[in-house]
Image: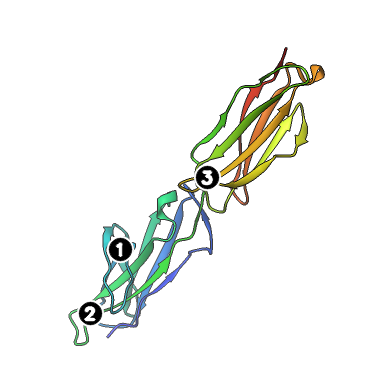
Amino acid sequence: PPSAPSIQGLPPLVRAGEELELLCESRGGRPAPSLHWDKGLGRTGLYWFDGQPLAGAWSELPGGGARARLRLSPAPEDDGATLRCRAVTSLPGGGASTSVTLRVMYGPSELALLGSGAVAEGGEAALSCTSAPSNPPVRLRWWLGGRELRAGHEGAAPGGGAVSNLTLRGRVQDHGAPLVCEAETPGVGTRSVAVTVSVS
């Protein structure tokens, strides 16, 4: 019978949208096993696997066995998904399978700044910046005219993501300056949203 399949080419972390090429090999066995890819959220082995078939390029190995290539571009919702390669054979003992878990890095799909940049001279205005979930978690930072401001509160947003609150103080010299909320996702990148400060 063929050996248990092995999966190669999966890095510990992959960015969402980045194309992967995985290789599954099962050596030995005549006739050669047929290899099948599945993706799901279940567990393998003695447990259930609620997967969907994936199309891969399959070929036989010269010394017996088979190889299957799979190209895919993981999406954020694939973080934690299981990829399984199954070697199916008509020989006694059936087939075998192996699986790997996808760890996908992605930035927030949405970033919103709540509140306006309008503030009276000498007064204060409250603003809030919220981000959608990301992996790893974002770091939210505030910038006013190129200088970093300290947020009053930072924490998790309802439903995941992050929130950062800022108290903006009205200074005439800041009139017309951009107030920027920046979301930095380590290993992925940054995105930002801004309002223009208006001091009256």
Q: Pinpoint residue 44: horizontal percent, then vertical percent.
A: 32, 73
- What residue did someone put label 2 on? 31
Q: Residues within 10 Å of mark 2 (few under 14, many from 20)?
A: some
For label 3, the crowd category at 10 Å Cα-Cα, with few meaning under 14, some 14 to 19 and many 20 or more, is: some
In the visual, does 188 lie left or right of 99? Answer: right
Q: Secondary structure at mark 2?
A: loop
User: Is residue 198 visible from the viewing direction of this image?
Assistant: yes
Contact check, label 2 and label 1, Cβ < 8 Å: no
Farthest top residue?
A: 200
Which one is nearer the viewer's eye here, 29 or 132?
Answer: 132
Amino acid, disc 2: Pro
Residue 148 shown left or right of residue 70 in the figure? right
Q: Secondary structure at mark 3?
A: loop
Nearer the observer, 78 or 63: 78
Q: Give the spatial CA distance, label 3 vs label 1.
A: 34 Å
Q: Residues within 10 Å of mark 1 (few under 14, many from 20)?
A: some
Label 2 vs 3, first from the N-terminus: 2
* Disc marking residue 38: 1
Farthest residue to the front: give it.
123
Question: Tag on residue 196?
Answer: none
Q: CA distance from mark 2 to mark 3?
A: 56 Å
Q: Quadrant of the C terminus?
A: top right
Amino acid residing under circle 1: Asp
Rendered location of residue 172, percent (x, y): 80, 16
Q: Nearer the viewer, mark 3 or mark 1?
A: 3
The quarter holding residue 86 reads bottom left
Identify the residue under disc 3. Answer: 157
Q: Is residue 182 left or right of residue 27?
A: right
| Amino acid at pointer 3 | Ala
